[in-house]
Image (tube, rainbow, N blue to C red):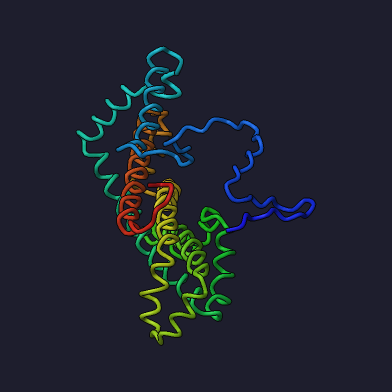
Amino acid sequence: MTDLLPTARTGGPAVLTKGAAPPAAPPQEPGPPVARGTRRRLGPGRSLPFGRLIGPVLLIAAWWAASASGYLDPRILSGPGSVISTASDLVATGRLQDNVLISLQRAGLGLFFGVVSGVVLAVAAGLSRSGEYLIDGPLQIKRAIPSLAMLPLLILWLGIGEEMKVTVIALGVAVSMYINTFAFLTSIDSRYVELAEGLDLSRAQFIRKVVVPGSLPGFFVGLRLGVTSSWVGLIVVEQINATSGIGYMMFQAQQYAQSDVIIVGLVAYGIFGFASDAAVRAIERRVLSWRRTLAG
């Protein structure tokens, strides 16, 4: 067999003859050393069990240290020991339990009505153009109006009873639920809608197989914000012409400069808010277990 001759062309690639050694590779500039078997981690890292308690525990420890060292004036901010003692006295007399139960009832009712109405409005506005034109505008206006600004009108309409208090809480929850559920519902890829139409799905099947899975992340975001809104609204309504509840207990303590009682109320609000948010997170992780996100 004859030898393969190189192509005689200026600048062309060299063709080796039979048995010839390959040309030497051009020298390369040295780069940064790369460790084999290692990979740079860009995520937030592994989650720790009960890791979210680290921040509150550190905050309480700093509060305790500042109180014990004399940096905090007990007339302005009572120390943790005094707060625990006051809480024990309130529990012994039954005053704290009674007010807590009433507050939980108000917050629970407002949260329930707010979640139901917010989701219904979001579905009605997200699945129909006429529903969007009729519903979205008023709710966007309501979002810009604080619930506190509507209190005089609600008191005029509903009085100062439980109906007004539950309505104020439900309005704040409904807006949070609507905004987030509607945003995720309308961001569902239109190709899924076309696929559902091609499969000739009914309206109920379309909602169950496309709308619900696509809007669930927004629903849980709205639910977390709605839980927070329910506690914020509860604080407001319980300090306006109320005769019971944690907010009423705090308002009465303000009249007598009892900062320890006020802090007991704040701690109760904080515990319930933290616990309810943790419960929603746990439900969200279980329901949306098919997702792989940075939250873990």
Position in image of residue 82 (x %, y %):
32, 23
Which residue occupies the foreground of this view, 278 or 79? Answer: 278
Quadrant in which residue 199 is drawn: bottom left
User: Which residue is outermost to the bottom?
Assistant: 200
> Taking 27 as reference, is 197 above or below it?
below
Does the image show residue 161?
no
Q: How many marks?
A: 0
Q: Is residue 117 left or right of residue 101?
A: right
Does the image show residue 132?
yes
Q: Residue at x 36, y 41 (%)?
A: 269
Q: Which image quadrant: the N terminus?
A: bottom right
User: Which residue is outermost to the left?
Assistant: 92
Position in image of residue 53 (x %, y %):
34, 35
Position in image of residue 243 (x %, y %):
35, 48
Position in image of residue 117 (x %, y %):
41, 68
Q: Residue at x 56, y 77 (%)?
A: 134
> Taking 118 as reference, is 250 above or below it?
above
Q: Residue at x 19, y 33 (%)?
A: 92
User: Which residue is outermost to the front?
Assistant: 1
User: Which residue is outermost to the right?
Assistant: 10
Q: Residue at x 32, y 27 (%)?
A: 83
Which residue occupies the foreground of this view, 90 or 257? Answer: 90
Which residue occupies the foreground of this view, 272 or 152? Answer: 272
